[in-house]
Amino acid sequence: MTLRSLLVGTGSALPRTAVSNAELAARVDTSDEWIVERTGIRNRYIAQPDETTATLGAEAAKRALEAAGLTPADIGLIIVATATPDNTFPATATKVQALIGTPNCVAFDVAAVCSGFLYAVTVADSMLRTGAAQHALVIGSETFSRILDWEDRTTCVLFGDGAGAIVLSAQDVDAVGHEGPGILTTRLHAEGQYGDMLYVDGGPSTTGTVGHLRMQGREVFRHAVTNLSSVLGEVMADIGIAPSEIDWVVPHQANRRIIDATAKKLGLPAERVVVTVDQHANTSAASVPLALDQAMRDGRIQAGDLVVLEAMGGGFTWGAAVVRL
Ligand code: UT7
């Protein structure tokens, strides 16, 4: 028997307001054609003042709990991956805890920007397997619209708001290798020397302001394809599988061209890659769990499937995980 973290439920939440490329082009010097051709994005959701990273995260968490057949009282660990917390402190995870009504538990945030969800899953998996809790909520939630410079067309068209959540449960599994359910491997990386290629130009300890997102898009694109291909190779080698054995890849949804280029490099057929960037744009730490929830609910991902999650973002940070449903 091996103690594994099983993925037992998913959920997601989007703000009420959808904004199409055409609507954005009425305010920003851009066009639907440019955005679709360069990124694949057609739509994004933008939070209203009453919708925050915590409220979206709590909504996604409630749906994940419902899917898992668990109640807030069952949860011993809440991790929120976010780069857009409601406040500098307390952690957004504690706000989610209060909103969903989980009694005394462990709750904290993880800041690894777009790969935050992969970092949070890795931490939760380690904690569950060492007995810190039996059930964990791992949430990616963001309101990037609050840190965008709406005068900068090179970045403001790329991002959206939203949240995704999963429930992980520690269970003894009678299986070896990549058979049987659960998280099978995770890999994380960071290269801080590239921090100035994708960052926010403010913060409590520097400017005392929130700041705005800045990005050298072309450089980030180049590193993303290289790093994601490489980390996908690592996780496949960890568990001894070939690309043909993967049922679904749920990639970070930053740019359709990055998703396609990475899949092509590994020889993964496009029909086994979940794509939601057209509907949600880049929702940073929320993008992987949002896409995962969509593919679970529409029946693409089925029990027993081998699913690979991957993401890359500011830091640079990147990572991947393999889970059997
Ligand atoms: O989540 C983590 C990471 N983020 C990413 O993974 C994003 C990675 N980068 C990218 O997705 C792409 O680099 C972008 C979508 C950001 C940009 O695409 P690109 O093909 O690299 O375009 P570019 O930056 O080379 O810009 C091409 C042209 C420029 O005009 P000139 O200099 O060639 O005349 C830009 O000024 O497109 C212009 N441009 C725009 N035009 C219309 C830039 N933004 C816009 C815009 N609308 N919104």
Image (spheres, rainbow, N blue to C red):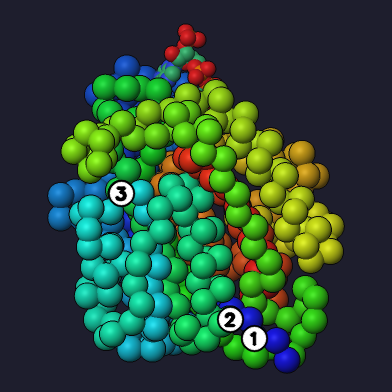
In which quadrant is the C terminus drawn? bottom right
Task: Write down the quadrant of residue 21 in the picture.
Answer: top left
| Residue at the spot of label 3 | 84
Tell me the quadrant of the picture where the N terminus can be found.
bottom right
Q: Nearer the viewer, residue 234 or 208?
A: 208
Whichever of labels 3 and 1 marks the residue nearer the N terminus, that label is 1
Q: Are marks 3 and 2 in contact (CB under 8 Å)?
A: no
Is the residue at mark 1 in contact range of ligand 1, meaning its CB lies under 8 Å from it?
A: no
Q: Residues within 10 Å of mark 3 (few under 14, many from 20)?
A: many
Mark sitting earlier along the chain (1/2):
1
Q: Is mark 1 on a helix, strand or loop?
A: strand
180 or 204, nearer to the observer: 204
Q: What secondary structure is marked by label 2?
A: helix
Three-letter code for the amino acid on which mark 3 is drawn: Thr
Residue 129 is labelled as 2
Residue lying at 28% horizontally and 28% vertically, measured from the top left: 149
Residue pointed to by mark 1? 3
Please tell me whether mark 3 or mark 2 is closer to you in this view: 2
Q: In this picture, is 277 found above or below 165?
A: above
Mark 2 closeness class: few <14, some 14–19, many ≥20 residues within 10 Å: some
The answer to whether residue 134 shows anywhere in this view is yes
- Left or right of 125? Residue 286 is left
Crowding near pointer 1: few (<14 within 10 Å), some, many (20+)?
A: some
Element carrying mark 3: loop
CA distance for labels 1 and 2: 6 Å
The amino acid on which the numbered mark 1 sits, given as a three-letter code, is: Leu
Percent position of residue 42, x then y: 44, 36
Q: Which of 87 and 270 is in front in this view?
A: 87
| Residue 240 position within the rendered picture, expressed as x and y whole percent measured from the top left | 84, 64
Between discs 3 and 2, the one toward the N terminus: 3
